[in-house]
Image (cartoon, rainbow, N blue to C red):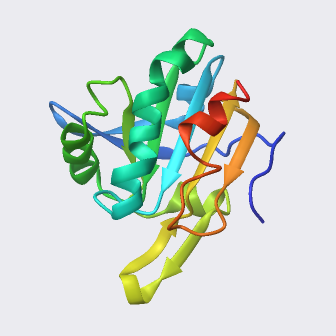
Amino acid sequence: MSISKGDSLPDATLLALTSEGPAPVSLAEKTKGRKVVIFGLPGAYTGVCTTAHVPSFIRTAPAFAEKGVDEIICVSVNDPFVMGAWSEATGAGKAGLTFLGDPSSAFIKAIGLDFSAPPAGLIDRAKRFSMLVEDGKVTALHVEDSPGTCEISAGETLLAEV
């Protein structure tokens, strides 16, 4: 069963790349008492993820901040080294976005937003989604029907609900 609006996020430990190497990040701690945007996508360096989804949140980051969003987090089923390099390559880190890896897909599976597409080499990946989380509770959620589209999960769409 997939997570829904009104549900609390399950606690999960994701991985961030720091100057000292990979570091665990508790999602419960990241969202406690805060307003956070989390968006997930099928994979770092993949087409729509790189050309549409990440740029939509780079463009809208200042407007989210003006509306009281404390942090924008991108989650993908990739290791923290890939996520760190991709953040740098897209300019997302400089724009203030946080990139976290879910290498075993534990968080994505826990929220029921996983899918596999073996012909494309995508196994246990994240569906394309965006959500607003306030104090650990999902207050808005958008999940694309197809991983190759970025319309309802784009930054602009979620921003309209904040």
- Which quadrant of the figure has residue 93? top left
Check the picture and name the quadrant holding the N terminus: bottom right
Residue 102 image offset from top left, x and y in percent: 43, 54
Residue positioned 60% across, 64% down in the render: 109
Answer with left or right where residue 22 lies relative to residue 24.
left
Q: Nearer the viewer, residue 34 or 151?
A: 151
| 134 with respect to 77 (left or right) | right
Give the answer, above or below, for where 119 lies relative to 66: below
Residue 79 sits above or below residue 91 on the image: below
The answer to which of 122 and 100 lies nearer the viewer is 122
Q: Is residue 123 above or below residue 134?
A: below
Picture coordinates of residue 19, whole percent (x, y): 15, 30
Q: Exactly how many numbered labels are in the figure?
A: 0
Residue 27 as seen in the image, left or right of residue 139: left
Among the 4 quarters of the image, the one containing residue 114: bottom right
Q: Residue at x 24, y 47 (%)?
A: 86
Residue 158 locus on image (x, y percent) = 65, 36
Who's the residue at 56% across and 74% down the image? 115
Residue positioned 63% across, 23% down in the render: 32
141 w.r.t. 71: above or below: below
Percent position (x, y) of residue 72? 49, 30
Of residues 30 and 47, the one nearer the viewer is: 47
Q: As drawn, which residue projects farthest toward the right? A: 6
* Image quadrant where one finds the C terminus: top right
Q: Farthest bottom residue?
A: 119
